[in-house]
Amino acid sequence: MKSFTITQNDSGQRVDKFILKTFPKLPKSLMYKEIRKKNIKVNKKRTEPNAVLNEGDVIELYLKDDVLEEKPKHYDFTGASRRLDIVYEDDNIILLNKKTGLLCHPDGNEYVDTLISRVKRYLYEKGEWTPEESSTFTPSLANRIDRNTSGIVIAAKNAESLRILNEKIKSREIEKYYITAVHGKPKRESDTLTAYLSKDEKKNMVTVSDTEFEGSKKIITRYKVLESRNNISLLEIDLKTGRTHQIRAHLAHLGHPIVDDGKYGDRHGRSRQALCSYKLVFNIKNAGILDYLSGREFEISDCEIINNFQEDRYK
């Protein structure tokens, strides 16, 4: 027999979903059978597969040990670096200043040392999260930015915060502002640009056009020129749609590619584009446990792109 007390991160999900995630060797048909036979109970009472679990509920499974083998406890994230630049943290979220060159999530070339792995190690070593106590939730990123783009990434510490953040990002109630250095100076000091974008999955590149074409999606990018010197301009970008490589490709299409963008600008560039997600504004409403963030702004105080521009490091 095994017994589990439901934590905050595991609450809100169905009994059958929780059990199957926790015990991958337990056949689904057997689980449903044992629920019917009352060998799986919640709070010492008969339950249904679709019953929703609440924090503090106790699940008891009177089954053989061979089908109750839990997920192996091997934690790859403990091999990640401890380096994190935390902009803000509370009981529900962490705002992180991701550095250029660091992946948000694993890819085919890097699996261990990613931003999310560093977050997991940080919370694990602080004692705020353990995989054993939260078998169906792990700390997660609510947004992501390219490896060679820097800036603020939001990490959720619990399932409810992640759900709310995903909802508010989708509804554009969390506004993201970028700083970038581009070649040349746009004709207008500020403008809202509309175009159409499509992605080539094989090449991981996008194409932008002023007119709609088959397979394209509408993009809207608002910019404001902050300063110009030596044929380089510092822009603030208010991203109204969030497509892949939107800022980089849209500005290049306008004739003002981002400095050091080896993909959409100078083909001999360093591929460490001068682009940073430097500010978040929480214009959120009816945000449940995150209501306290409504109206708050968070900004990277020491932006490398601004410093490089002011010191004339861009050419």
Image (cartoon, rainbow, N blue to C red):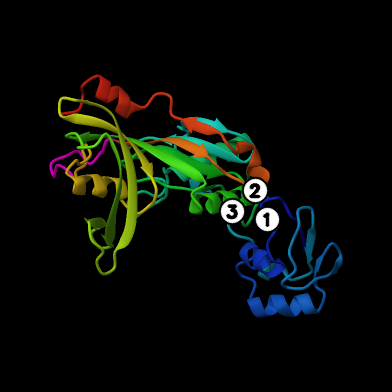
Quarter holding residue 70: bottom right
Residue that label 1 marks: 10
As shown in the figure, which amino acid type bears the numbered disc 3? Arg
Residue located at (79% from left, 69% from top): 62
For label 1, count other residues whose C-alpha is less than 10 Å away and answer few (under 14), some (14-19) or many (20+): many
Q: Magenta part of the protein: which range?
A: 265-274
Q: Assess disc 2: are there few (<14), some (14-19) or many (≥20) residues with their C-alpha within 10 Å of its C-alpha.
A: few
Q: Which residue is mark 2?
A: 286
Q: Position of residue 306 (x, y in %)?
A: 31, 26
Q: Are marks 2 and 1 in contact (CB under 8 Å)?
A: no
**In front: 93, or 297?**
297
What residue did someone put label 3 on? 163
* Residue 78 visible in the picture: no
- Magenta segment's dominant SS is loop
Q: Residue at x 23, y 31 (%)?
A: 233
Q: Residue at x 28, y 58 (%)?
A: 197
Q: Magenta stretch: residue 151 in it?
A: no
Q: What whole-number distance in Å separates the C-alpha atoms at marks 3 and 2?
A: 13 Å
Give whichever of 164, 130 is nearer the camera.
164
Q: Residue 51, image x and y in percent?
A: 75, 68
Q: What residue occupies the far top of the structure in this picture?
A: 311
Question: Secondary structure beneath disc 1?
Answer: loop
Element on which disc 3 rests: helix
Tell me the CA gap for discs 1 and 3. 13 Å
Residue closer to the observer: 127 or 1:
127
Tag 2 or tag 3, which sits nearer the N-term? 3
Q: Does residue 270 appear in the picture of this structure?
A: yes
Q: Assess whether mark 3 and mark 1 are in contact (beta carbons under 8 angstroms).
A: no
For the point 26% across and 39% down, the residue is 273
Looking at the picture, which amino acid does disc 2 mark? Asn
